[in-house]
Image (spheres, rainbow, N blue to C red):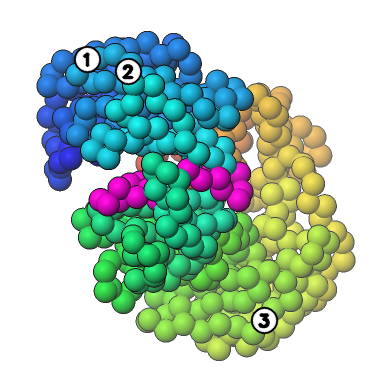
């Protein structure tokens, strides 16, 4: 998509080859045009909307309702439109080199083919008002004069590291360029004279008369003339993209939602709710449930409400992905693992346990005992189990355990609890909390699912293009059904309390009657969940909560006739 004044041009995925212009702020459709093929690049300036389609690569220009097409000689890598809409610059990728095609929009023809880049062109700017075309190719930034009869490339800047990028042109006509993990620089686009240079680590942006530069956790506004720092915002994340809306600078980064950097604002609000990375743990409490994500967020949800009731950030470390940590919900209290500690969140208060021996990978509340059961993993071969006081988080008991990368199961009133791996289950006594002998090898094995009555084991073995389910009768010590070959999996499988096994695929969730060894139902999915999807059964098997690798959470209802008579 590309912002074009008071509108935004988009190429909808469901309408290949069509470009639609939407009015702001309501995104009402204004008009559209046929680009003639899959759209790879979009740009806008003045009244001009430019698109690149391919392969073969074609530049499509739309101006005042008239559409023109220009065949491109090489692969188009980037696109720039002048602010007045009179010129379009296309950077090409010719393998080891590149070129810039300067297109006159009114004439509908290539005015100049600009040579000089020694690498594929990665970014391009054109501004007829300042009579300049600028391109970034590899570590070099080059410039040409728009008005010249035979433009010749001028070397403007060479970054100290591979990969120069363009931030934009200031109203005074200075080029702001940058190299990640190096510096941000102001350059005269005609002579290459450097006005100033400042260390930076992330991207830079020119927005009107403001220059923004990112460095680690800091987003800084710089004086365009001197490079002096006017203001600094400090955020927990690393900014890896920048854009702007009015006076607000918008940044995005790994493990964070879009961040809003506002002039004079003491805090840095973030847009959106929920998770921005995969959900790694889910726990239910009636019609409410809690999720914990690799983005270090814990969210409490009410069924049917797409917005979380409560969100907490467990760890301020930027870009840290914890893919194994537990979470539990007990009424208004959340227990969550955060590295080697357990965090207790209740009524706006937060408390943390002492540092435990290993990373917390599973947590379950035992409200009838006033305790929290915790599993930790330390190293490759060792695990530790803990029983903590639910109020003070003091350690009441501990025991050695095999390598634990799974879940804990407990039913209130029971004297036992389960440790569940993807490849097996162990049932242990709570009162005889002692060291366990053995080692659970965490290498690839089939997933193992055990029915609630412990009479049937189902093995799910994933292959490249398919998966195989095998059904083993524990009492008979023999196969109960013939193996079933199913489509390739898109994530984990989960067994319900009533004997239905949910497997996730690119097109649907399939429910299997494990007692009969047959398909019970298919739940079509509107889009592929991608790899890393996990189905979680709501209490009473009323529905499935599907978590995607992107952080998306979807409730999938079950058909009324999915439960067979033998289950009842």
> Helix, strand, or loop for circle 3?
loop
Residue 326: name its quadrant. bottom right
Question: Does dot 1 land on a helix, a strand or a loop?
Answer: loop
Give the residue displayed 51% in from the left and 84% down from the top. Answer: 351
Query: In the rendered image, is residue 57 in sight?
Result: yes
In front of the other: label 3 or label 1? 1
**Residue at the spot of label 2:** 111
Range of the magenta residues?
Answer: 156-176
In the foreground, 176 or 234: 176
Instruction: Assess disc 3: are there few (<14), some (14-19) or many (≥20) residues with their C-alpha within 10 Å of its C-alpha.
Output: few
Label whose residue precedes the other's in the sequence (3 or 1):
1
How many circles with numbers are drawn on the protein?
A: 3
Q: Of discs 2 and 3, which sits in the foreground? A: 2
Residue drawn at 73 percent across, 66 percent down: 377
| Residue identified by numbered label 1 | 107
Establish if 399 lies above or below 279.
below
């Amino acid at each position: 998509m590309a912002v074009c004044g008071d509108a935004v041009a988009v190429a909808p995925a469901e309408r290949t080859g069509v470009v639609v212009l939407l009015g702001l702020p309501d995104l009402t459709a204004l008009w559209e045009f046929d680009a003639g093929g899959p759209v790879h690049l979009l740009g806008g300036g003045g009244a001009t909307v430019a698109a690149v389609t391919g392969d073969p690569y074609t530049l499509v220009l739309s101006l005042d309702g008239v559409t023109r097409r220009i065949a491109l000689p090489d692969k188009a890598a980037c696109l720039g439109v002048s602010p007045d809409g009179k010129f379009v610059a296309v950077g090409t990728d010719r393998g080891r080199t590149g070129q810039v095609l300067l297109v006159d929009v009114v004439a509908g023809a290539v005015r100049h083919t600009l040579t000089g880049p020694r690498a594929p062109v990665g970014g391009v700017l054109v501004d007829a008002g300042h009579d300049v075309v600028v391109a970034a190719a590899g570590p070099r930034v080059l410039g040409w004069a728009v008005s010249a009869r035979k433009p010749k490339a001028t070397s403007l800047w060479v970054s100290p590291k591979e990969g120069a990028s363009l931030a934009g042109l200031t109203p005074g006509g200075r080029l702001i360029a940058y190299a990640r993990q190096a510096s941000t620089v102001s350059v005269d686009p005609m002579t290459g004279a450097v006005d100033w240079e400042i260390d930076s680590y992330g991207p830079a942006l020119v927005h009107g008369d403001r220059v923004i530069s990112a460095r680690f956790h800091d987003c800084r506004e710089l004086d365009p003339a001197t490079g002096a720092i006017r203001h600094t915002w400090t955020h927990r994340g690393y900014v890896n993209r920048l854009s702007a809306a009015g006076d607000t600078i918008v940044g995005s980064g790994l493990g964070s939602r879009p961040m809003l950097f506002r002039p004079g604002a003491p805090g840095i609000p973030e847009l959106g709710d929920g998770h921005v990375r995969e959900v790694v743990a889910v726990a239910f409490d009636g019609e409410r449930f809690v999720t914990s994500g690799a983005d270090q967020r814990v969210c409490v949800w009410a069924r049917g409400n797409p917005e979380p009731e409560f969100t907490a950030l467990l760890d301020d470390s930027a870009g840290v992905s914890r893919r194994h940590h537990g979470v539990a919900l007990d009424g208004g209290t959340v227990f969550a693992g955060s590295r080697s500690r357990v965090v207790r969140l209740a009524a706006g208060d937060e408390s943390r346990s002492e540092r435990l021996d290993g990373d917390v990978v599973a947590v379950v509340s035992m409200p009838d005992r006033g305790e929290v059961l915790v599993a930790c993993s330390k190293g490759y071969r060792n695990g530790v189990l803990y029983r903590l006081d639910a109020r003070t988080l003091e350690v009441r008991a501990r025991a050695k355990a095999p390598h634990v990368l799974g879940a804990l199961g407990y039913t209130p009133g029971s004297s036992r609890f389960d440790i569940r791996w993807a490849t097996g289950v162990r049932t242990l006594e709570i009162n005889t909390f002692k060291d366990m002998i053995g080692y659970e090898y965490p290498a690839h094995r089939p997933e193992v699912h055990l029915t609630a009555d412990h009479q049937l084991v189902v093995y799910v073995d994933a292959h490249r293009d398919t998966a195989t389910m095998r059904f083993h009768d524990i009492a008979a010590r023999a196969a109960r059904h013939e193996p079933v070959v199913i489509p390739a999996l898109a994530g984990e499988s989960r067994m319900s309390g009533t004997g239905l096994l949910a497997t996730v695929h690119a097109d649907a969730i399939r429910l299997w009657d494990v007692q009969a060894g047959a398909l019970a139902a298919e739940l079509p999915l509107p889009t592929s969940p991608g790899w890393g999807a996990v189905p979680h059964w709501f209490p009473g098997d009323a529905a499935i909560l599907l978590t995607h690798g992107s952080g998306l959470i979807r409730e999938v209802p079950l058909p009324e006739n999915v439960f067979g008579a033998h289950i009842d």
